[in-house]
Image (spheres, grey):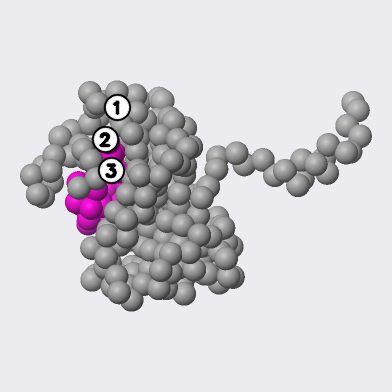
């Protein structure tokens, strides 16, 4: 079992190291992650410039590789033969902040897992419910143990290669976590505001600011579960077709 560990926060992020350590008992671990933070970068395929990769020494004698590409580029590199051994599974994270609802379309953590599934192997994305802007004393070790237990199940179970799981873990000690809930995507409430300022040359620039997003804590959803102290596992698929609307549209007359 050859497990690729990546993330969107960059090769130096503590969540990456915690996840890599947790994967070591489960198989051969390779780390290939971006050389800087790509959070909220969406699903990227870098085609118009070369991708550079350099070797990095991580803690615990673990060798890693840092790329100037996006998280999904890191997965593509690995799947297309960067490592001599075929990759069987991709785990991404542990992102310090949750990825729920519409976040999934922005999330580098999740799009790395999506890239795995596009390449034909299961992809698991792990995120934690940490307060935005406070990265102190996060329970990475507890989240990593949860990640290891879930990954072990994916390795042992007969899940299809298209298995794409979005996992959100409360920022709690392991014994404070209530358990696991299988959920659907919930709804985010974004509070983005456009901030317009002037640069030192008096030219305007724009910055998307505003308060961090809220969510609708509905039962059965990712946001509902994780904010209530449960680990949330949401199975995803890349088929974005809206079948309900497809059926309505199919009944409409569409002659030109
Ligand atoms: Mn991130």
Relative placement, left or right, of 234 versus 157 is right
Which residue is labeled 2 in the image?
Answer: 2
Are there few (<14), some (14-19), or many (20+) residues within 10 Å of tag 1? some
For marks 2 and 1, the one nearer the N-term is 2
Q: What element does badge 2 sit on?
A: strand
Quadrant position of residue 200: bottom left
Image: 187 above or below 20: below
Does the stretch in magenta take in 10?
Answer: yes
The part of the chain drawn in magenta is 1-24
Per the model, the C-alpha gap separating discs 2 and 3 is 10 Å
Q: In this view of the protein, which residue sits in the foreground, 93 or 155? A: 155
Front of the two marks 2 and 3: 2
Q: In this view of the protein, which residue sits in the foreground, 96 or 167? A: 167
Are there few (<14), some (14-19), or many (20+) residues within 10 Å of tag 2? some
Q: In this view of the protein, which residue sits in the foreground, 45 or 141? A: 141
Residue located at (36% from left, 54% from top): 150
């Amino acid at each position: 079992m050859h497990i690729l560990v990546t993330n969107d926060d960059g090769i130096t992020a503590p969540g990456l190291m915690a996840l890599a350590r947790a994967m070591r008992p489960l198989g051969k671990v390779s780390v290939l992650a971006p050389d800087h933070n790509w959070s909220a970068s969406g699903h990227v395929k870098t085609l118009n410039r070369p991708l550079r990769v350099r070797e990095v020494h991580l803690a615990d004698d673990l060798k890693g590789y840092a790329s100037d590409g996006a998280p999904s580029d890191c997965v593509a590199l690995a799947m297309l033969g960067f490592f001599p051994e075929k990759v069987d599974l991709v785990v991404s994270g542990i992102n310090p902040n949750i990825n729920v609802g519409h976040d999934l379309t922005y999330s580098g953590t999740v799009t790395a897992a999506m890239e795995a599934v596009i390449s034909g192997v299961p992809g698991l994305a792990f995120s934690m419910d940490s307060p935005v802007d406070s990265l102190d004393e996060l329970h990475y070790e507890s989240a990593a143990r949860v990640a290891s237990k879930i990954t072990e199940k994916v390795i042992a179970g007969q899940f299809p290669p298209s298995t794409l799981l979005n996992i959100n873990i409360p920022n709690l000690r392991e014994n404070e976590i209530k358990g696991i809930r299988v959920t659907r995507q919930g709804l985010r409430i974004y509070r983005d505001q456009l901030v317009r300022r002037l640069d030192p040359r008096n030219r305007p620039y724009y910055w998307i600011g505003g308060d961090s997003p809220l969510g609708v804590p509905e039962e059965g959803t990712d946001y509902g579960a994780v904010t209530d102290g449960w680990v949330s596992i949401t199975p995803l698929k890349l088929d974005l077709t809206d079948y309900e609307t497809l059926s309505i549209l199919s009944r409409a007359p569409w002659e030109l």
